[in-house]
Image (cartoon, coloured by chain):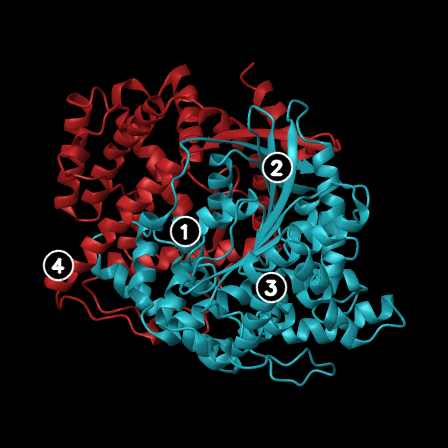
Amino acid sequence: MRTTAPVIMLLLALGGCASQEVRYRYLPPDTPAADNAVNLEKALGLAAQVASAAKSAMPETTGEFAPITPADAPPLTTYDPWAHFNRSMYRFNARFDEAVFLPVANGYRRLPSPIRAGVHNFFGNLAEVDSVVNYTLQGRLGRGLRSLGRFAINSTLGLGGLFDVAEKLNIPRAPTGFGTTLAKWGMHPGPYLVIPFYGPSTLREGIGLAGDYGTSYAVNVANLYRDGQSWGLGVLNAVDQRANVDFRYYASGSPFEYDTIRFLYVRKLLIEDAGLHRKEPPKRVNPDAPAGE
Amino acid sequence: MKQSVVAFALAILFVFPVIAADPAPIQPPPASGPATGLADLAALRATVFGTPPQDIAPLPEKVPLLEMDLALPWARPVPAVFWFDRRLRVWFSAQDKPAPLAIVIAGTGGDGNTAKLSVLRAVLYGAGYHVLTMPSPTFPGFIVSASSTGVAGDLVQDGRDLYAAIQQIIAHLPRKVRVTDIDILGYSLGGANAAMVKSIDAAERKVNIHRALMINPPVSLFASVGRLDKLYAITLGLGDAGVERFYQQLYAALANLYRTSDRVELDEDFLLGAAAAILKTNAEFSAAIALTFRIALINMFFAGDLYSGSGIVVDPRHPPNVGDSLEETFRILRGKPFSEYFSKVFAPYYLRRRPNSTVDELNAESRLEFIGAALRSDPDYYAQTNSDDLILDAAELDWLKRTFGARIQIYDHGGHLGNLGDRQQVADMLDMLGGRWKGSAQ
């Protein structure tokens, strides 16, 4: 049973659906009023942020780092020595997402939002364990303590992590992982890598994912990472993550989507890396090496 | 709304077109007068950021959403690199009682579910319409699945393709849906498309479209696009060096903002704030607008070249295959202004197809004046635009006023689509579509 279901899913994904004249897909309803209220809140928050930033620069930011200049920008090209594999994997992921992952996530999104929020908080709370370990490895002990505090508060007052009480106490989520630790230790993103079922990544971030899973497996909170329930939890975690990502493969309709996503993803990583080394002078770029190498 | 700002922020950072300077053999109509002269900072800002959330018209709590993927019988063979665009994808929101249907068409390069379409869908659904949102005929997914030529940008041809697609979609709406009346509308180029579809229907009577509304339409497609090409050349300059410099500046600005923030992840909210912090001057807003527009055209250029076999970026004898790298193609395309699409792909293709036609006739088909008689005399055409819309010049704005008379509402501010979804625009739109419009008050 455990093996047949994934095989059927794979066949569906690879074969595509049988061709019919019209296909109907009922989606979870739009919630425009609530969405606009959220946008309004964010806009006001943004205005407040700008105003307060103008009044006093945040203490963390004053004069501790050399600013990045345009000459420090990585080249326009991206390091992708495994492009052939990556392109076919991108296509595979797009088909799998369309045939299996997205329909399941859309079904999941029909559950009442308190239930989904509970699930999301639960997995977020479990991830704090990995964050504590990695903040420690990165030498950011203050942040590590915050993650530990969040884990303690949410596991107890938040009923096993179902509620994010710490957020209400003004200790917001700030997850990290082994990929970021490797970056902090000076490792470059490395070759671009499209991971099957998962999506855009690089070699470093791929190793990071394996490290994160290894950490969770080793700590094994409440014995969740052993035996039968670990599979169920893994799938639920994946569905929760997918349901919270507003991305549709080939919504752009564009044959350049692979290139665009690769470009975006690696620049995002590099900017985050620059943020990790905010107290050091910017790394000099080698204009002949593609971004990420 | 948020989506569009983020998309825009990504766009300004991550696509780097270059203006190619080689002269074209056939020139598109000259862009008469810099319309940007009409646009002040407020207009540019509105164009980039759209209607602020506090000014948005009242929205319903829930809008049901059905995605329909159609295989259309007249679709041309699908090129390998477009394997994912085989079917036309549209979105439909059904009332649970008999109701009028509003068909809404996206602007240049837009799919059938853009952030602007979502706003229109919400207010129209809230006002009691079934709502069908459709991609622009310049969207690659439409070009591949529904175009009979593969070469988009001809208002008449695109109108015919849209009209045929609409008939198929209506025939396949869920069986329980009861439609009492049909109206059509669109924003930007989609507005011109909507009016063209109604005028075709007036002759053929296969759908029986009642009213048509154009929101911020171009008066001449190629003149408006030429204006944006020009804006691009002015703000971003010429040549590869200019493009690289622009990218490097944006990268540095974003990276420094990120380093001063306390964030552990570069997420959407950060980009939202970054766009507000990075863009401040007229030139920056103008560059962003010109760039966003250029991006919307890259796919259309590529598809047109591929389908017509023009060989500008794609060798017709060796079309690219699924796993092939398109990096070089993209690099060349981002440097091509729209005028080159017109002169090297569009015009040669249509002149070949219609041996007795001329470039002037092709140009005429891209102007609203082509259906001017209907727009002037039929009381069921309406329009909304802004006096500071940067895709129009003063003469074109005047043409709209004279043509529509009391059936147009011109707002003082909003730039291009920067007031879409605000209370006044929505109230007037619903009055126009509902037949309650008493003429412009101001």
Name the one closer to the observer, B86 or A152.
Answer: B86
Dot 3 surroundings within 10 Å: few (below 14), some, or many (20 or more)?
A: many
Q: Nearer the viewer, mark 4 or mark 3?
A: 3
Q: Which mark is residue B367?
A: none
Query: Are dots 1 and 4 on a single chain?
Result: no
Specify the quadrant of the image occupied by residue A5: top right
- Circles 4 and 3 on the same chain: no
Q: Subunit of mark 1?
A: B
Q: Earlier in the sequence, mark 3 or mark 2?
A: 2
**Chain identifier of the residue bearing label 4 in the image:** A
Q: Secondary structure at mark 4?
A: loop
- Which residue: 36% across, 19% down? A226
- The residue that label 1 is drawn on is B424
Task: Give the vertical position of B341 relative to B410 (above or below).
Answer: below
Mark number, residue B101: 2
Task: Using the rendered view, name the quadrant where residue B209 is placed.
Answer: top right
Q: Is residue B120 left or right of residue A74?
A: right
Q: Among the chains, which one is red?
A: A
x and y percentages locating residue A234 in the rendered image: 41, 26
**Whether residue A90 is situated above or below residue B42 in the rendered picture:** above
Determine if residue A79 is in view. Answer: yes
Query: What's the amino acid at mark 2?
Result: Leu
